[in-house]
Image (cartoon, rainbow, N blue to C red):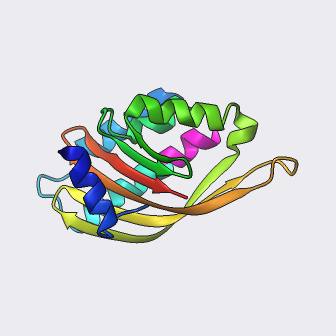
Amino acid sequence: MKRNKLIITLLLGIGITFAGCKQQEERQLTRNANAPAQHDAATAEAQVRDMLASQSACWSQGNLDCFMQDYWKSDSLLFVGKSGLTYGWQKTLDNYRKSYPDPAAMGRLTFDLKEMRHLAADHMLVVGKWHLQREAQLGDLQGHFSIILKRFPEGWKIVADHSS
């Protein structure tokens, strides 16, 4: 049922789209500890921007385990990419490892956020562009993404990602 709701949500247009892991965890804990009791829009957006900046840094350091910390660690995580639908955190990580087997293939990741929409107090849609700067022989890659995030007690997590 949750999978169907996510797919329907995506189809309706709501969202299609080294510091090391220890520092990533510490940044997440710091963001959560400093979060106010009321969750205003500006605070939520700042938290998500920080999360995506941390993800970009992890990726650019060739650290997929660190990068994946901000994804919902659930079999219901939805990733939509050029190969279609993928369900599950582990499967998504495995696909990343297959597609980007080493730091050279991963390159340097940057995000250009275009829009942030609050769908509810604990859900947000983020749309943007991604760019991988890589060595000349590999070539750069770029595309667009839309992610749906949910606020959990431990912070914001990506529950659906469409990247193309």
Quadrant where the N terminus sits is top left
Toward the left, the furthest residue is 37
Image-quadrant location for residue 140: bottom right
Q: Position of residue 73 (x, y in %)?
A: 33, 32
Question: Compared with residue 115, is residue 75 higher up or lower down, i.e. above or below?
Answer: above
Q: Residue at x 55, y 39 (%)?
A: 58
Q: Main secondary structure of the magenta part?
A: helix
Q: Residue at x 50, y 38 (%)?
A: 67
In the image, is 125 to the left or to the right of 141? left
Q: Residue at x 37, y 34 (%)?
A: 88
Quadrant where the C terminus sits is bottom right
Toward the right, the furthest residue is 137
In the image, is 129 to the left or to the right of 75? right
Answer yes or no: is residue 107 visible.
Answer: yes
Answer yes or no: is residue 18 visible.
Answer: no
| 83 or 120, nearer to the observer | 83
Q: Position of residue 143 (x, y in %)?
A: 60, 62
Q: Position of residue 65 (x, y in %)?
A: 50, 29
In the image, is 49 to the left or to the right of 94? left
Q: How many marks?
A: 0
Q: Position of residue 62 (x, y in %)?
A: 64, 35
In the image, is 48 to the left or to the right of 23? left
Q: Residue at x 57, y 44 (%)?
A: 57
Q: Which residues are magenta?
A: 54-63
| 13 or 24, nearer to the observer | 13
